[in-house]
Image: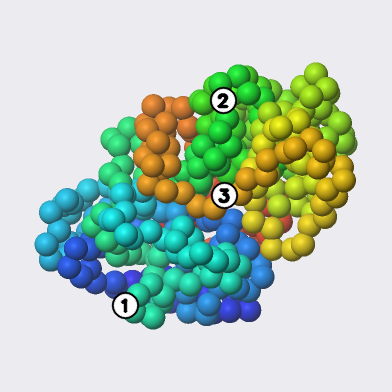
Amino acid sequence: MKAAVYQGNHKFTIEEVPDPIPGPGQIQIDISYAGVCGTDVHGFQYDKVPPGSILGHEFSGVVSALGEGVTKWKKGDRIVGGGGTHPQGILPDAFTMPRFNFRTDGFDNTRWDATPQPEGYAEKYVMEEWAPLPTPDNVSDLEAALCEPAANAMRTIRRSRMKTGDTVAILGAGPIGLFCLQIARASGASKVFVVEPSALRAKAAEELGADEIIDPTKDDPVERLVALTGGFGPHIVLECAAAPLTLQQALESVRRHGRVVLIALSWDSVMVSPIDWVSMEIELITTLGALDVDFQATLALMSSGRITMEPLISESQVQPLENIQSVFEDLIKPDNRVQAVFKP
């Protein structure tokens, strides 16, 4: 099969590699679409991906072969690449390792047999029978491919403990920020404000119903967010940008006893000044990834139309896998794209 193989030193190549064969209790998936996660971009940007890796954990597909003993699926079933309920005692390392460090542990895709496993940037993928979810009839394969990042946003909102009527600020209108905007709306936020310097991403936030969009190159986002909330600050601030100043801005702008949720993965040190916000007794929450309940809740909102992929991506913007090198280079400077998706 065709696959995009990371060679190290910021370089992908398209190669023919052996098809993955499903073992007992496993299914083979023909990949329909594979989305690009910001963590994959960071791994490329900082050259942290192990050479020989085939990345791509945001995908949709069709069941093409069954391993021995599989009864849950049949050939031709459409799937979302994750969200199934983990068997008792089996969870990803990020949720079980007591000192999990994403920078050092997050790109280890060797699984149990110490052999690199192909993921979604390939024509086929093998999953455990329990791992995927069925794609609803009214959700397209392209939409289903972005269920994973939307589920990350779902977990962010759930971790924030947002209440109906809360005001929410989102720093960064990339894919996660735009999904957070939609889920906050669906969860009863009274106002959602977005801070975003990119005109393309700001336009997407506007189309998705942000109450106000703040350009941090023109206005002080802390002053503006405080002013928009009657001098108090938002109840919840979601840090989805990982820019040098955004964590400090989130902590400064949230109201007394408010909550800041850090979902952005900054690989560089960032500046914080505790003296500017410590007296407000702020709660700082971190989050990484999504659990099965987050996938399932997200897919329900997608099926009901309360989460939409527009204006994040359209069929005309889908790229062939052969363009992976140029797409990743573009995504390091995200002004040109909101979301990237490949069709192997």
Compared to residue 331, the image places residue 310 above or below, namely above
Tell me the CA gap for discs 3 and 2. 18 Å
Name the quadrant of the C terminus. bottom left
Q: Earlier in the sequence, mark 2 or mark 1?
A: 1
Q: Residue 163 carries which label?
A: 2
For label 1, the crowd category at 10 Å Cα-Cα, with few meaning under 14, some 14 to 19 and many 20 or more, is few
- State if disc 2 and disc 3 touch (CB < 8 Å): no
**Picture quarter with the N terminus:** bottom left
Q: Who is closer to the viewer here, 118 or 123?
A: 118
Q: Nearer the viewer, residue 2 or 24?
A: 24
> Residue drawn at (53%, 56%), measured in percent from left and top?
36
Type of amino acid under label 2: Lys
Q: How far apart are marks 3 and 1 (CA)?
A: 36 Å
Question: Closer to the N terminus: mark 3 or mark 1?
Answer: 1
Name the image quarter holding residue 135: top left
Element at label 2: loop
Q: What is the three-letter code of the residue carrying label 1?
A: Pro
Asked if residue 101 is positioned above or below residue 140 in the image, the reply reads: below
Could you say which is closer to the camera, residue 278 or residue 32? 278
Left/right placement of residue 99 relative to residue 269 reads left
What residue is disc 1 on?
Answer: 18
Q: How far apart are marks 2 and 1 (CA)?
A: 49 Å
Q: What element carries label 1?
A: loop
Question: Is 282 positioned to the left or the right of 177 in the image?
Answer: right
Instruction: Give whichever of discs 3 and 2 has the lower sequence position.
Output: 2
Q: Is disc 3 placed on a helix, strand or loop? A: loop
Give percent across and percent down for residue 49.
Answer: 56, 73
Instruction: List x then y, in percent, for residue 329.
Output: 65, 63
Describe residue 103's horizontal placement relative to residue 290 as left or right: right
Task: Name the disc covering residue 287, or none.
Answer: 3
